[in-house]
Amino acid sequence: MKKRIITIARQYSSGGLKVGKRLAEEMGISCYDSEMFRIVSSGQNMRDKDVAHDDRIKDTSLFDVARERYKDYGEEGLATDMDDILPFRNIYDYQSDIIRSLAEKEPCVLVGRCADYILRDRKDVLRVFIHAPMNFRMRRASSVHALPDEELIAYINKKDEKKASYYHEYTGGNWESAVNYDLSLDTSELGIHGCVDRIIAYLNIAL
C-alpha cells in the first residue's frame, strides 16, 4: 500500500519541524504540528464553531476535524476553570481522535503528538525520527536562546526528557527506540533538504 501519511518525531532543535514543513511543501500536502494541535485544544479557540480566529489553523482540515471532535466531547469536562484548556488525559484522547480523522481525510505530515503510535495499525503511514548530535542542536538552539553552553545543554536535555516522558506516559514505549520508526535521519549529516529527499525517495519505493 502506498504511504500517504508521514509522521515525524524529532529531538529538540534537530530541525524536524522544518523537515516536516519542507516535505509537505514539496509534496503539496498539509503539515500539522504540535503548536497547531495546542491551538485546537483550547476551548476558547474552538467554542466559536464556524470561524478559526488563528491564522495557523484557518482554512485547514485540522480546524474542521477538531471542530467536529470537540462536539463529541461536549462542553462539560473539556475545559478547566484555570486556563480553559482540556485536562491532560482528555487532551491526548481528543488529539488522537483528530489525528485518526485527519489520516482518513487526507494525505498529510504530522509532527509530534505520538502520531506514529496513534496510527500504528495503518499500513499507509511512514514513521520518521529526526535527530542530530548535541553540538549541532546547540548551534541551532543558540540562535533562539542566549544561554551559556552548560545551561543550553541542560535546556535541550530537559526538552527531550519532556518529549520522552509524554511519549511513555501515553504509549508505554520508548520515544527514541528505532522499532517505532521506518526511517531515522540525522540532520547534521543530511541537512534539511537531504532529509526531505530521502523521505521522498523512501516514499517512492514503499508501495
Image (cartoon, helix red, strand yellow):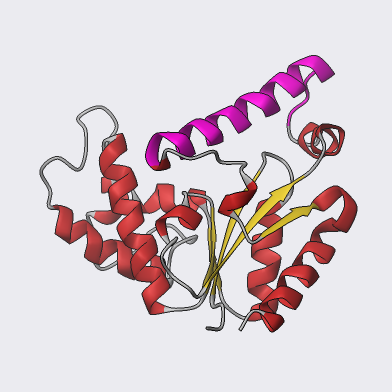
The residue closer to the viewer here, 45 or 188, is 188
Percent position of residue 62, x then y = 40, 66
| Residue depicted at x 38% and y 59% | 53
Residue 207 included in the magenta stretch of the image = no
**Viewer can see residue 198:** yes
The residue closer to the viewer here, 185 or 147, is 185
Task: Classify residue 132 as left or right of residue 16.
Answer: right
Q: Where 38 sits versus 126, above or below?
A: above
Percent position of residue 134, x then y = 81, 32
Identify the magenta region: 145-170
> Which quarter of the figure has residue 155?
top right
Q: Where 80 sits versus 63, above or below?
A: above
Residue 159 included in the magenta stretch of the image = yes
The residue closer to the viewer here, 167 or 174, is 174
Task: Classify residue 27 as left or right of residue 76.
Answer: right
**Viewer can see residue 148:** no
Percent position of residue 35, x then y = 50, 49
Which SS does the magenta portion mostly show? helix
Q: Where 49 sits versus 197, above or below?
A: above
| Residue depicted at x 42% and y 52% | 37
> Which quarter of the figure has residue 190?
bottom right
Percent position of residue 167, x then y = 48, 39
Task: Classify residue 34 as left or right of residue 11.
Answer: left
